[in-house]
Image (tube, helix red, strand yellow):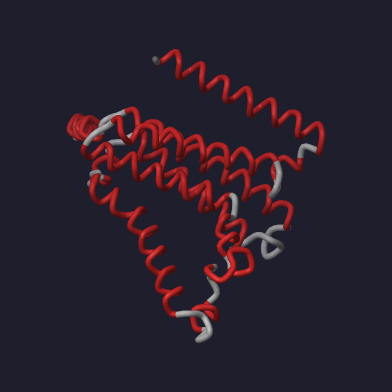
Amino acid sequence: MRIGWWVTGALAAAVVAGSGLWYGLSFGWLNLFIEDSWIELVQVCAWLAGACWAWWRVPRVEGRDRWLILWHAVICSLAAAREQDLQKYVNPDRFGELGVSFRIAWWLDPAVPLALKFGWVVAGLLVGAALTVPLLRARPRLVLLTLGLDRAVWLFGVGVFFLLLGYGADDLFGRGLIMSTKASEVLEETSELAGVALVVASTVVTGRGRLDAREERARSKLKAES
């Protein structure tokens, strides 16, 4: 099984490296790392791979482990959808009369049916529940796992840091505000790619282990250091 994982990883790395080489030679090396280019396609594929792995593992584990890998499945699925800007396709100009706008003016517009607004509020609450309920049911001891240097937790945490760094490069200090537009695009996309890779790696580690065993290892490590 371990050899199979190494072979799968090597093949995936070869495909990514080969596609990057082709794209760089065809369109320029700098264009590898800007929006709507090769790097965003790799990010989407990584999120989808993580989501497929997590959903595949959901029925194959039990108890707290099932809830935790379900949480990862939801995160990877929503991240893949967001990376493709699927929220644009529910706007009224594309989704028609049942569409939703995320602008406050739409929500305050008396011409928009109240039932439609209520329906989208319910949809938002369901998404929020999907993001919180599985984690609450899993009840991972995050402080213990963090202090015990649990791999999955640290991979996830560092991955989120890089994703937030990419967000900052996009909306806070990039786009010509502090950094040039081109430099901020490169920082944004490379940071997001690193974040995606680490979060998906965390998903794989989570799906292969048992939460009870991970907590016990963290507890034993802390006792040995005290």
Q: Position of residue 44 (x, y in %)?
A: 58, 42
Question: Is residue 65 depicted above or below 15 in this figure?
Answer: below
Question: Is residue 4 depicted above or below 61 in this figure?
Answer: above
Q: Nearer the viewer, residue 102 or 32?
A: 102
Quarter of the rendering occupied by the N terminus: top left
Q: Nearer the viewer, residue 186 or 83?
A: 83
Q: Position of residue 122 (x, y in %)?
A: 37, 66
- Side of 224 relative to 107 (left or right): left
Name the residue at 67% across, 62% down. 178
The mark tally for this picture is 0
Quarter of the rendering occupied by the C terminus: top left
- Side of 220 relative to 158 (left or right): left
- Farthest residue, direction bottom: 110
Name the residue at 39% across, 37% down. 55
Q: Position of residue 62 (x, y in %)?
A: 23, 34
Question: Is residue 145 depicted above or below 3 in this figure?
Answer: below
Q: Nearer the viewer, residue 111 or 223?
A: 111
- Farthest residue, direction top: 3
Name the residue at 57% across, 46% down. 192
Q: Nearer the viewer, residue 223 or 13?
A: 13
Name the residue at 54% across, 78% down. 106
Q: Position of residue 131 (x, y in %)?
A: 36, 53
